[in-house]
Each structure stands twice: as structure tokens, then as C-alpha cells.
């Protein structure tokens, strides 16, 4: 069932870690805002993600984004981003929001 889903909507769940998404081969939209994520891992297992909503978490490091070659929109507002890696080669990115907490 999950393999056919094109989106996952899991907000306000207290999620602290992203699981391996290999089984979600059709995943294009991932809503994980308002959780407790501290780092982003396993996104490379879902290379078809186009829209990624991660605002209002506790993320300090974003890496591995170079494998998300289809990523069009990335929302990181209200996190604690100190390191952001892998966006320079992304030719599809149209929208990027990153306003860190003070």
C-alpha cells in the first residue's frame, strides 16, 4: 500500500527520525513539519521527492540533498540549520524557505 502512495502526511506526531523510505518508490510529497526531527537521513532512499515540508522541527544539519534531483520545493523555516549541503547541483529547485530561529 505504501509503495503506491505519492505523498506522506505525518505532522504533529513527535517524529524524531525518518525511516528508510525505499518501499515508497512513488513518493513525491513528504510532509513532516511540526515534529521533533534533529537531522535528516534516509531521504536518499526516496529520490522522487519533489515537495519537502520540514518546517518547525529541530533540524541542525541537512545533508544528502544532492540525491533529490527532482526536488522543486523545500521548506525549512523554524529549524536550527547550521549546515546545509547538496543543493548547489539541484536544477529543479524553484522554492526554498529557510528562516532559522533566533
Image (cartoon, grey):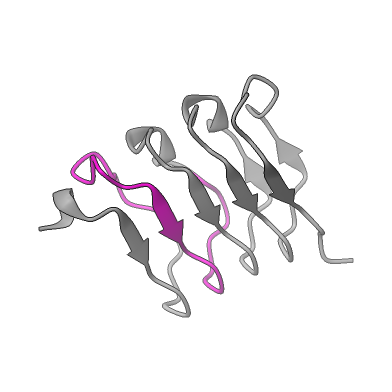
Considering every residue shown, the one lying at the far left of the view is 1
Q: Name the side, left or right, on which 34 lies relative to 102.
A: left
- Residue depicted at 48% across the width and 32% down the height: 70
Above or below, comparing residue 96 to residue 86 in the picture: below
Q: Dividing the image into 4 quarters, which one contains the C terminus?
A: bottom right
Considering every residue shown, the one lying at the far right of the view is 102
Q: Quick check: is 81 in the magenta stretch? A: no
Q: Name the side, left or right, on which 41 lies relative to 33.
A: left
Magenta segment: 17-40
User: Percent from the top left, x then y, of residue 71?
Assistant: 53, 38
User: Percent from the top left, x then y, of residue 97?
Assistant: 74, 53
Above or below, comparing residue 48 to residue 13 in the picture: above
Q: Quick check: is 38 in the magenta stretch? A: yes
User: Percent from the top left, x then y, of residue 17?
Assistant: 42, 57
Q: What secondary structure do most residues of the magenta stretch adopt?
A: loop
Most foreground residue, 1 or 94: 94
- Residue depicted at 82% across the width and 59% down the height: 99
User: Percent from the top left, x then y, of residue 76?
Assistant: 67, 56
Quick check: can you spot residue 63? Answer: yes
- Residue depicted at 39% across the width and 71% down the height: 10
Amino acid at each position: 500500500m505504501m509503495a503506491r502512495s505519492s505523498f506522506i502526511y505525518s505532522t504533529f506526531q513527535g517524529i524524531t527520525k525518518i525511516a528508510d523510505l525505499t518501499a515508497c518508490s512513488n513518493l513525491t510529497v513528504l510532509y513532516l513539519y511540526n515534529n521533533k526531527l534533529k537531522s535528516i537521513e534516509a531521504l536518499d532512499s526516496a529520490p522522487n521527492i519533489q515537495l519537502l515540508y520540514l518546517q518547525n522541527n529541530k533540524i541542525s544539519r541537512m545533508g544528502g540533498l544532492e540525491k533529490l534531483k527532482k526536488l522543486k520545493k523545500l521548506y525549512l523555516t523554524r529549524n536550527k540549520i547550521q549546515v546545509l549541503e547538496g543543493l548547489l547541483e539541484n536544477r529543479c529547485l524553484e522554492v526554498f524557505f529557510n528562516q532559522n530561529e533566533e
